[in-house]
Image: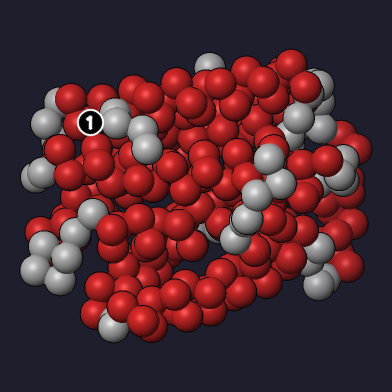
């Protein structure tokens, strides 16, 4: 188990650098995740949370779920279905960068976050955690414009495509982090209020739902969206290593 947020950042950097060497799309998510974690670390150091020590613990527990999943892939270990779907796509060159990012976010926020939050508090402490939990939304919101700018270096007409996709299928183009984190908080409360013997069943049920949504991200039902994604993939610029650096540096 990692013991500091700096150790988390170092582990994420290791995955990112290895992905650059291997030209692996796995590095898209780890690069972006590393940037987010640095922002959270800086907010903790500035004392912006009500309980900064607990937020560092949450960050470590949360990140460890992704890092454990990554190691499980490399060592053919046990994986949640959500991460299995996401990692399987890293060796298939048919997805655009945004799809790879959304698959990682889907597994990590929609499944892992609620589990991690329920492990760093109890029923009594849940109320005091809530404000800090949602304060992360402000940090993520402040990063959106910069991240979109980075993505335009990979695919220039991103703004136009965002509008097109939004009118066709908001589940793909407007993956709402705020909405996802709201659902993750509900999952946190559900797990905290459940009997211990029921928690595993709840997690497995959610994993099934999250992995099913991942399949929709990979192959949307509407042919028009699939055509648009193909067009983006053809027109995406730069090699995988450069794209990873753009997302993380």
Q: Residue at x 81, y 72 (%)?
A: 221
| Residue nearer the viewer, 67 or 217 | 67
4 on left or right of 248: left
Q: Estimate the x, y position of residue 69 in percent, counting from the top left.
A: 57, 47
The answer to whether 214 is drawn above or below residue 145 in the figure is: below
Can the viewer see residue 173 in this picture? no
The answer to whether 200 is drawn above or below residue 1 in the figure is: below
238 on left or right of 38: right
Q: Residue at x 37, y 37 (%)?
A: 1
The answer to whether 159 is drawn above or below residue 237 in the figure is: below
Q: Estimate the x, y position of residue 231 in percent, counting from the top left.
A: 88, 45
| Residue nearer the viewer, 217 or 73 | 73
84 on left or right of 183: right
Q: Estimate the x, y position of residue 123 in percent, counting from the top left.
A: 15, 71
Q: Quadrant of residue 54?
A: top left
For label 1, the SS is: helix
| Residue nearer the viewer, 194 or 59 | 194
Q: Which residue is mark 1?
A: 43
Q: Estimate the x, y position of residue 239 in percent, counting from the top left.
A: 81, 21
Q: Residue at x 40, y 29 (%)?
A: 8
Q: Quadrant of residue 160?
A: top right
| Residue nearer the viewer, 242 or 167 | 242
Q: Residue at x 24, y 48 (%)?
A: 135
Tell me the crowding category of disc 1: few under 14, some 14 to 19, or many 20 or more residues within 10 angstroms, Cα based: some
């Amino acid at each position: 188990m990692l013991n500091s947020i700096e150790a988390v950042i170092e582990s994420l950097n290791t995955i990112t650098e290895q992905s650059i060497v291997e030209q692996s799309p796995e590095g898209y998510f780890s690069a972006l995740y590393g940037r987010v974690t640095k922002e959270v670390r800086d907010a903790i150091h500035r004392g912006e949370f009500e309980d900064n020590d607990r937020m560092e613990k949450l960050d470590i527990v949360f990140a460890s779920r992704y890092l454990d999943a990554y190691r499980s892939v490399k060592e053919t270990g046990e994986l949640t279905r959500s991460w299995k779907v996401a990692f399987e796509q890293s060796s298939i060159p048919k997805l655009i960068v945004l799809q790879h990012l959304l698959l990682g976010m889907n597994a990590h926020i929609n499944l892992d976050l609620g589990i991690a939050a329920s492990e760093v508090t109890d029923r009594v402490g849940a109320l005091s955690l809530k404000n800090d939990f949602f304060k992360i939304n402000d940090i993520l919101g402040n990063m959106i414009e910069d991240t979109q700018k980075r993505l335009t270096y990979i695919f220039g007409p991103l703004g136009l495509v965002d509008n097109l996709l939004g009118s066709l299928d908001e589940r793909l183009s407007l993956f709402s982090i705020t909405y996802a984190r709201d659902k993750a908080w509900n999952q946190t409360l559900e797990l905290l209020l459940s009997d211990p013997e029921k928690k595993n069943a709840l997690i497995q049920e959610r994993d099934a739902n999250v992995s099913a949504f991942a399949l929709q991200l990979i192959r949307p039902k509407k042919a028009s969206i699939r055509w648009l994604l193909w067009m983006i993939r053809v027109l995406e610029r730069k090699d995988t290593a450069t794209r990873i650096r753009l997302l993380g540096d």
